[in-house]
Image: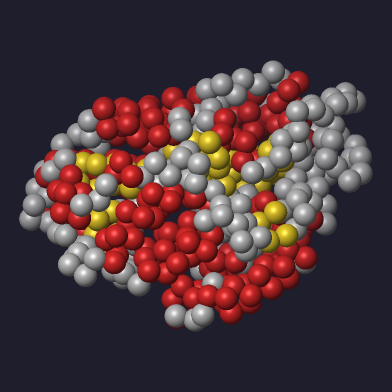
Amino acid sequence: MRKFCCAIAVIVLCGAVLCSCQLQEVRQTNETLEICSTSSTDFRFQAALKQYQELYPDVTVQITSESNPDIESSQAYYTKLASEIMGGKGPDLFVVNDSFWNVEKMMRQDIFADMQPYFDADAFDWEPYNTAVMEAGVWEGKRYVIPLTYSIPVLITTQKAIDETGFDVGNCGDFYGFMEETQKIMDDPNQTRAVFRQSWTMKWFPQIAGISYIDYDNLLIDPTAPGLAEGLAWCRDNFAEDLGDYNLYDLYAAASIWDGHALFEYPFSYGLKNGFMLNYAVLDTVDTGVMVPIRNLEGGINARVLDAVAVRANSPNLQNAYNFLKILLSPSLHTECVGNQTDLSVLNEANWDYYRRHAEGYDFIQSYHEDFTSVDTIPESAMAEYMGYTEEVDGAYFLDRSGFISAMFPYLYEGAPYEETLTEAVAEVEKNLSE
């Protein structure tokens, strides 16, 4: 768990509030604002820019967007961007991409600005937001990263599938119980269903389960962390059952469950509407839909931060950056962007707004499956259940980029010995942490 400092950073006024996390003081001019966006945030940033220019017409704003055709190009782009930011150059405000950055490590390197003094000076009201998710960007009382969207590990299935497998939802009060119930299915030679349609999504189980095996404050790894060895063995058995269908669109999720191929779908990969709402609505039309949250070791729920932004620590435009952040978090912007939002918003009411606008507007091909000739509106009670799980979120995470899980692939995928693979994985993580 992150350590939170209760002391509030001293607010220094010198024409503007100066960021307390800078390695050296930077004179604040607040004349311009340079922003780096991505394809997932472009619509939101452009909508925010329109509002910003109306409020601050004298500020020159430049927005550039990362749009690379492949993973290699994106990796090169974000490596270059990180180098620029660490060197005190680059955009003032940028999207934090945990697909390529070790965000936890970067938050401790004084390269992101602490924006907490600005929120404090503005008496910003955090109550309407999912505060547990927002705290993911806070370290020792300093607000380095600002989450905008997130997902929660809620699985969908049908009552028929639950009955056929004998899965005991009541035994899933924590991650240990969930592993126990799913392991029964994997060990039963008479079961025809895989546990997950896409088992690769479980490779991030340490973060979902809240297993604290990396200490970023002291740059250490604890390979004996509670739940880690058991989770890796469970994950290995789970990978062995992968159905090999990685299509993230249409109704492959609902069809896989309805046709008896898988017990669960984990729809975080493709958003709130076409992921959860559409597939749950279809399953609830042909049967009775069921939701099963994957709880952490303590029985709470860990959320994954998706879109998030940060500000360069030595930016001369911190007040301008804060003013843009405030618009990004505003209810008016979330309402305007609701048609382009696919993930859960950190603003709680925006998710209900999204539901009300899209409950019947499914992208749905009737000829896709002979049993899916129509789809009922997802019941409000189902959305209420789903949103109830967001209220149980007691931790949030960025993807782990220490290299541990990938270093364990020989054990997870190829049958390599556990201790030997673990030793090599620990060495790899220690190397990555020291760089």
Asked whether residue 172 is in view, the answer is: yes
Q: Nearer the viewer, residue 188 or 373?
A: 188
Residue at x 43%, y 44% (from the top left corner): 174
Q: Nearer the viewer, residue 18 or 242?
A: 242
How many callouts does the rendering have? 0
Question: Quadrant of the rendered structure where residue 295 is?
Answer: top left
Q: Is 387 situated left or right of 75 in this image?
A: left
Q: Reply above or below: 190 against 148.
A: below
Residue at x 66%, y 52% (from the top left corner): 103
Residue at x 56%, y 34% (from the top left corner): 132
Q: Nearer the viewer, residue 46 or 15?
A: 15
Locate residue 433, reporting x and y percent. Answer: 73, 63
Locate residue 271, reporting x and y percent. Answer: 38, 46
Question: Quadrant of the rendered structure where residue 170 is?
Answer: top left
Residue at x 84%, y 25% (from the top left corner): 11
Locate residue 7, reporting x and y percent. Answer: 80, 27
Locate residue 350, reporting x and y percent. Answer: 44, 28
Q: Nearer the viewer, residue 175 or 431?
A: 175
